[in-house]
Image (spheres, grey):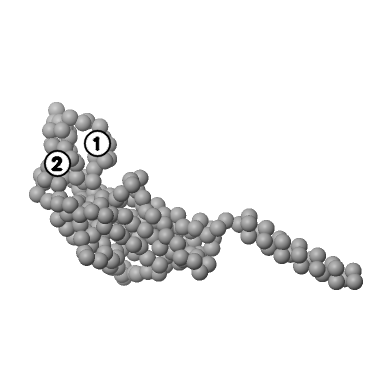
């Protein structure tokens, strides 16, 4: 009788400990860091207005510009799981919220940009009827598509090359992932409620140095 009782207590304790471990352990999740940028940026200012601002960060609020297919605006996504448990990222959903004509006033300013290499690069046609991510090869690398696995010690970085054509596009982005058989999504934000990129249109283009008053 004592042996049976001890076995029952042990089973209850073991089950209870497993339950407590489940309560104490972190739930699987995904952290997404987003950075939207481009070498040329659009500013809703004339050259004279730009020259009146002598600060070094005056282009900080500029809008990303895709000047050509070879020089697109880029949305970099760094994906990392919140725990050591690997999760599967199944894709990225891009939704166009609006598409207006390229601005007819203002300036395009070319900044100096360094090069970057990515393992996973995707072209995103923001004015297509159905927006898809098309995997492309970068340099000597091969085009790599979804799905992909990430954990806290094995993050992944994606480059979304944004192609708005001759439009000023506002859009949203969601990363879709699966953990423990359940589907989830994480909305991407770069410190802005809505992401935006524009084509260059016929706006005047200046080098960054030209935006400062010459001595």
**Regarding mark 2 in the picture, which secondary structure is present there?**
loop
Quadrant in which the N terminus appears = bottom right
Quadrant in which the C terminus appears = top left
Taking the view exactly as shown, the residue that stands out farthest to the top is: 215
Q: Which is nearer the eye, 192 or 87?
A: 192
**In terms of image quadrants, where is residue 158?**
bottom left
Q: Residue at x 46, y 65 (%)?
A: 183
> Where is residue 74 shown, x and y percent of the image?
27, 55
Q: Which residue is mark 1?
A: 58
Q: Residue at x 11, y 45 (%)?
A: 104
Q: Residue at x 26, y 64 (%)?
A: 131
Quick check: 74 above or below 7?
A: above
Observer able to see residue 4: yes
The mark total stands at: 2
Q: Which is nearer the eye, 43 or 173?
A: 173
- What is the crowding at mark 1: few (fewer than 14 residues within 10 Å), some, or many (at least 20)? few
**Regarding mark 1 in the picture, which secondary structure is present there?**
loop
Classify residue 61 as left or right of residue 157: left
> Where is residue 159 shown, x and y percent of the image?
32, 59
> Where is residue 150 shown, x and y percent of the image?
46, 63
> Where is residue 6 shown, x and y percent of the image?
84, 67
Classify residue 104 as left or right of residue 59: left
Q: CA distance from mark 2 to mark 1?
A: 14 Å
**In terms of image quadrants, where is residue 120?**
bottom left
Q: Which of labels 2 and 1 is toward the front? A: 2
Observer able to see residue 153: no
Q: Residue at x 9, y 49 (%)?
A: 202
Q: Which residue is mark 2?
A: 106
Quick check: 187 above or below 143?
A: above
Tags 2 and 1 in contact by the CB under 8 Å rule? no
Taking the view exactly as shown, the residue that stands out farthest to the front is: 97
Of mark 2 and mark 1, the one earlier in the sequence is 1
């Amino acid at each position: 009788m004592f042996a049976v009782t001890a076995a029952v207590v042990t089973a209850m304790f073991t089950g209870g400990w497993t339950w407590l471990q489940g309560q104490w352990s972190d739930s699987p999740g995904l952290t997404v860091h987003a950075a939207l940028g481009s070498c040329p940026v659009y500013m809703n200012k004339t050259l004279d207005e730009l020259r009146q601002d002598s600060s070094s960060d005056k282009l900080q609020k500029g809008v990303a510009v895709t000047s050509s297919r070879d020089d697109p605006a880029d949305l970099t996504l760094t994906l990392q799981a919140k725990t050591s448990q690997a999760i599967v990222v199944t894709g990225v959903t891009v939704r166009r919220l609006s598409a207006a004509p390229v601005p007819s006033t203002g300036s395009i300013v070319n900044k100096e940009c360094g090069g970057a290499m990515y393992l996973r690069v995707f072209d995103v046609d923001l004015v297509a009827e159905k927006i898809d991510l098309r995997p492309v090869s970068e340099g000597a690398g091969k085009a790599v598509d979804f799905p992909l696995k990430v954990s806290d010690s094995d993050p992944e970085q994606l480059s979304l090359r944004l192609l708005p054509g001759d439009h000023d596009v506002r859009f949203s982005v969601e990363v879709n992932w699966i953990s423990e058989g359940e589907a989830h999504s994480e909305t991407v934000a770069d410190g802005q409620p809505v992401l935006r990129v524009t084509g260059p249109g016929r706006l005047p283009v200046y080098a960054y140095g030209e935006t400062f008053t010459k001595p």
